[in-house]
């Protein structure tokens, strides 16, 4: 590997630090890169501290250190997308778009333009080559597996991607970092880029769009409460609105629908579900390798850390449809439905 150069995305955390450490031991020419992204001026962010930690790791390993300016890509393809999806009544998945357009978009272009053969990150997932085809698999540590967020990657990205820690449990990554004396060995896990961390969504959106309170209706159309703006609610949500009727307020109520034009939220005492025989439409479908056969049985996840459910994949006209074979919670439009065959992530789509 001495003639192969890999740019490692150093976030300032322990996972990417060990990724760089391992690649260096394997004989690659390693360059550490901090990816600078956008955040609103009014939102407090510690990116400078994260960059400093990334620099410390690079210095400890004795590798070059660069900064990739991806602010514009992040603002356009993650920040503006986030607001636009909520305005349309959908629920965005910014982590997926950050991976697609920033880490494996802007950063990959930056790396190849500057002489890299590969890029690498600290994601808990695996890439394996199979007779010239690059396949994406779940990470060995099922509690940390991040393949759900990587479903948009194609052969173009996977052929240039190394994921050095996907075959290891997190606790062993910590031990390895300590043994190697990495400055980030005992650092707490990052909550991600500031904008993707624990932000208050209504507060964030209020800077970019108008939030108006409106009525909460039951499934019969009766007004039973108030909400703070229909666009901030998601299917299955059971908090954040007020039920006025004392006799019904004691029972949990779940958002089952919302109407953006009338700014109304509809709730019921049972959460929304998709029953066997019903379907989930997918938009913007992407496959990591070759497309699967339709009528194939797959396992699917419509949210991160969800227990995968068995489903049938169908092509109906131009629509790709998932038919769950068990009852599952109804996913909100805009979220990702990620498809697997065994441990292989074969792709996915955006829920329509």
Image (spheres, rainbow, N blue to C red):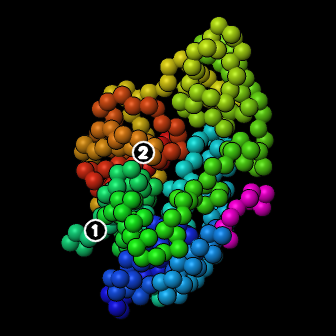
- What residue is shown with label 1? 128
Give the class, few, some or many, for how many residues have Cα within 10 Å of label 2's Cα (few <14, many ≥20): few
In this rendering, does residue 106 appear at all? no
Single out the residue that lies furthest toward the left.
Answer: 131
Which quadrant holds the N terminus?
A: bottom left
In percent of width and height, residue 50 lies at 62, 69
Residue 165 pos. (x, y %): 37, 67
- Would residue 131 appear left or right of 223 to someone viewing this image? left
Mark 2 or 1, which is nearer the eye?
2
Residue at 50% across, 19% down: 270
**Image quadrant assignment for residue 59:** bottom right
SS label for mark 2:
loop
Residue lying at the far bottom of the rendered structure: 3
Depicted 54 relative to depicted 3: above or below: above
- Is residue 176 a member of the stretch shown in magenta? no
The answer to whether 194 is drawn above or below residue 36 in the figure is above
Q: Residue at x 53, y 55 (%)?
A: 95
Q: Earlier in the sequence, mark 2 or mark 1?
A: 1
Percent position of residue 112, x then y: 48, 82
> Is 280 placed above or below 318 here?
above
Dividing the picture into quadrants, the one containing residue 39 is bottom right
Image point 57% across, 75% down: which residue? 54
Magenta-colored segment: predominant secondary structure? loop
Question: Which residue is disc 2 drawn over?
Answer: 305
Magenta residues, as a range?
A: 39-48
């Amino acid at each position: 590997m001495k003639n192969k150069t890999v740019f490692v995305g150093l976030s300032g955390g322990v996972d990417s630090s060990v990724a760089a450490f391992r690649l260096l031991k394997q004989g690659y020419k390693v360059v550490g890169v901090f990816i600078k992204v956008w955040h609103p001026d009014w939102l407090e962010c510690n990116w400078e501290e994260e960059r400093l930690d990334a620099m410390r790791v690079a210095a400890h390993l004795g590798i070059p250190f660069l900064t990739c300016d991806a602010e514009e890509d992040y603002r356009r393809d993650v920040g503006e997308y986030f607001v636009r999806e909520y305005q349309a009544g959908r629920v965005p998945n910014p982590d997926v778009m950050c991976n697609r357009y920033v880490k494996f978009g802007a950063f990959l272009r930056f790396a190849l333009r500057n002489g890299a053969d590969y890029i690498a990150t600290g994601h808990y997932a695996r890439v394996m080559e199979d007779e010239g085809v690059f396949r994406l698999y779940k990470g060995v540590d099922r509690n940390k597996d991040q393949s759900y967020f990587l479903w948009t990657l194609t052969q173009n990205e996977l052929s240039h991607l190394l994921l050095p820690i996907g075959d290891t449990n997190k606790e062993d990554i910590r031990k390895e970092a300590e043994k190697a004396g990495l400055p980030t060995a005992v650092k707490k896990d990052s909550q991600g880029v500031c904008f993707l961390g624990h932000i208050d969504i209504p507060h964030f959106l209020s800077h970019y769009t108008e939030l108006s309170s409106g009525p909460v209706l039951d499934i019969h159309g009766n007004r039973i409460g108030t909400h703070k703006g229909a666009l901030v609610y998601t299917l299955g949500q059971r908090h954040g609105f007020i039920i006025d009727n004392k006799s019904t307020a004691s029972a949990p109520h779940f958002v089952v629908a919302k109407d953006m034009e009338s700014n109304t939220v509809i709730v019921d005492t049972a959460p929304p579900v998709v029953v066997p025989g019903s379907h989930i439409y997918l938009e913007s479908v992407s496959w990591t390798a070759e497309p699967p056969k339709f009528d194939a049985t797959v396992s699917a996840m419509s949210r991160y850390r969800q227990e995968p459910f068995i489903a049938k994949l169908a092509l109906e006209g131009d629509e790709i449809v998932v038919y769950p074979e068990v009852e599952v919670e109804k996913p909100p439009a805009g979220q990702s439905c990620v498809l697997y065959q065994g441990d292989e992530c074969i792709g996915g789509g955006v829920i329509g």
